[in-house]
Image (cartoon, rainbow, N blue to C red):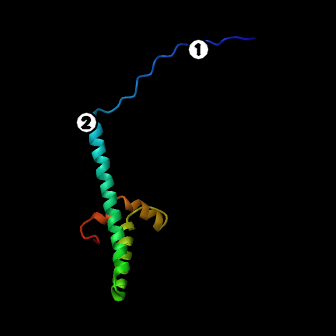
Amino acid sequence: MNQLCSDPPTTPQPAPRWPDLRELTLQTRRDDEDLGHAIDELRFQVMALEEILAAPWPRVLLLLARLRSDLRASVRHSEGAGFAERRLNAIGTGWLARPGAPR
């Protein structure tokens, strides 16, 4: 019972459409801008921690209280089960880039 199966002929699939150079350039610029915003937020967060570490003793308490207040305010209106989940939801929203944020 050695039978050859003949498959019906298949129609050729169209090649994937690659964006033209203008579309690719615009998408690259958008991605670069988004990455720049994320890096800026990370830089502000690191600077806030560095300021706490470099501050003299009485000022450390003030800076810790300010950071704690800013962190709590950043997650106040976010959805999530706990602080960590709400914080992950709030990180990408540009909270630290808002006017009046710690610099």
- Percent across and percent down for residue 44 are 32, 67
Can you tell which quarter of the image residue 97 is in?
Answer: bottom left
- The disc at residue 60 is none
Classify residue 65 as left or right of residue 103: right
Residue located beneath label 1 in the image = 7
Q: Work out which residue is located at the far front of the displayed protein and give it.
A: 54
- At label 2, counting other C-alpha atoms closer than 10 Å, the crowd grade (few under 14, some 14-19, many 20 or more) is few
**Foreground residue, 50 or 19?**
50
Relative to 72, residue 28 above or below: above
- The disc at residue 22 is 2
Camera-side mark, 1 or 2: 2
Looking at the rendered structure, the number of numbered marks drawn on it comes to 2
Q: Dot 1 lies on which element?
A: loop
Instruction: Specify whether residue 5 is in view.
Output: yes
Q: Dot 2 lies on which element?
A: helix
- Percent across and percent down for residue 101 are 28, 70
